Amino acid sequence: MFHLERTPSSKQGAKTPTGKAKTPTSSVSGSKETPYRLRRKIKQKLSKMKNDELSSEESDSEKSSEDEEDTEADLKNYFTIVSQSRSKTSNHMLSKLGRPMLSMEQINQTLAQANDSHAKPRKHLLQEHRSNFPKWIALLMEGFNLLLYGVGSKIKLMQDFREDFLSKYASVTINGFNPGVTVQEIVTTILRQVMGEDSLVPGLTNQVERIREYYTQKDADELFLLVNNIDGSGLRNSKAQGFFAELARVARIHIIASVDHINASLLWDQEQLKVFSFVWINATTFEAYVLESSLEPLKNNASATLSSLQHVFCSLTPNAKKIFLLIARYQMECKDSPGYIGLSFQECYKRCREAFLVNSDLTLRTQLTEFLDHMLLKMKKGQDGAENLIIPLDDGTLNLFIQKQEDG
C-alpha cells in the first residue's frame, strides 16, 4: 500500500560522481577562536615586547658606557694633544716688511709738519680762554677752586695761566695723567721745594697736617696747585681725593684742576664737593692729547699688572695677605736705601712672629711658597748665603697697590 524509499542520511557522506564519499567540513569551528587562545596570544605578544625593551636597554647602556670611556680618554689626553700640537700663530711680522718702524719722536715730528686746517680756529679759541684769566684769578682769591672741563688737552692753557698770573706766587704742577704719581710724592715736593724743610716728620698724615699748619699762619704765602687730570688713574682713589680736600680747607691753598673723564664728577661726594667749592669752567680747546697719550703704554702695563696682582691677592688667606703687605711696606720704606737687595727671611720671620701671623719658620715658608708659585715674590740668595725676599714690581705700581688695600 505504501511505497517506502530510503534517503541518504546527512551524517553519511554523499557520493560524488566518481563514487567516493564527500567528507563534510565545519567552517564555524575553524574561524572562531576560544578565550583560551586569545589569552595565549596576548601573553606571547607581551613577552615579546618585554624582551625587545630589555635588549634595547642593554644596547643603550653599552653605547653610553663606551661614550663615557671615550670622553674620559679624551680628557686625559687633552693636555698631551695640546702640548704636541703645533702653534698656529702667524709669523708675519712688521719687521719682515723691510721698512723701519717710526719712533714716537718721529711720529710727533711728522704730525707737527702735517698741514692742520683747524690750527687757526684752535688758536682763536685759546685767545678767548686767555681773556678770562682775570676772572679766574678773582674767583681763586675769593676762596673758590677752578675745575676745567671740555674736549681737548688743557695743559698749555694751564701753563699760560701760570706764566701770566701766578709768577709771583708759589705754585706746583701735578701731572695726574701719569700713573706713577702718588700722594706721598706730592706731599714731599710741597714740603721740600716749597716750604724748604729738610727733615720730614714721619707718617703721611703728620706731613699733611704740617702743611695745613704752615699755611694757616697769618704771614704764610699763597700756594697754587695746578693738577692736570685730577681724575687720572694715579689719583682716582679716595685717599688722593681726600688729600686734596684737606688742602682745600686751607684758605691760602688754591686748586686749579682739569678733568677729561665723562664720569669725573662721581669721584666726590656731597661733603667733598662742599669743601672743594669748585667753579666748573668750560675750557674746550680741541688740542691733541700728545703728552697724555705718550704715557698710555705705561698706563696700560701698570693697570694690567695691578689688576692681575689684585686678582691673585683676593684668593689668598687673611694671614697670607698680611704677610705680603708686610713685605711690600718694608720694600717701599727701604726702596731708596743704597744696596737694597730685599727683606731677609729671618727678618721677615721675626716681623711676622711679632705680628702673630706665623708660629714657625715652616709655616712662613709654606705661605711664601704660594707667593713664589704665583710669581708675586722672588727669593734670592745674597753673598752671605742669606735668603732675601723681593717683590718684582716697580715702585709706582706697588705703592698704588698698597694704597688701594689701605683704602679697603
Image (cartoon, rainbow, N blue to C red):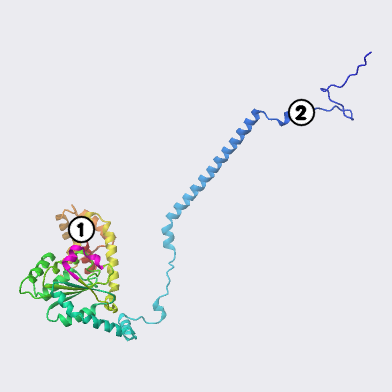
Whether residue 388 is visible, yes or no, is: no
Image height of 365 relative to 245, above or below = above
276 magenta-colored: yes
Residue 281 locus on image (x, y percent): 23, 74
Q: Residue furthest top?
A: 1
Which residue corresponds to mark 1? Answer: 323
Q: Residue at x 64, y 28 (%)?
A: 36
Residue kind at label 2, given as amino acid type: Ser
Badge 1: how crowded within 10 Å, few (<14), some, or many (20+)?
many
Query: What's drawn in magenta, residue-wise?
Result: 264-278
Q: Quadrant of residue 273?
A: bottom left
Which residue corresponds to the image point at 18% horizontal and 78% vertical from the top-left? 135
Q: Is residue 88 above or below residue 171?
A: above
Q: What is the spatial separation of the Cα atoms under label 2 and label 1, in whole angstroms?
A: 106 Å
* Left or right: 29 as drawn, with respect to 67: right
SS for callout 2: loop
Please say whether residue 309 is visible from this viewpoint.
yes
Residue positioned 43% across, 57% down in the render: 78
Of 281 and 30, nearer the camera is 281
Residue reaching furthest to the right:
1
Locate the C terminus and report the quarter of the image it occupies: bottom left
Task: Please name the residue that numbered disc 2 is placed on.
Answer: 26
Residue 47 found in image quarter: top right
- In the rendered image, residue 80, in percent from the top left (x then y), is placed at 42, 59
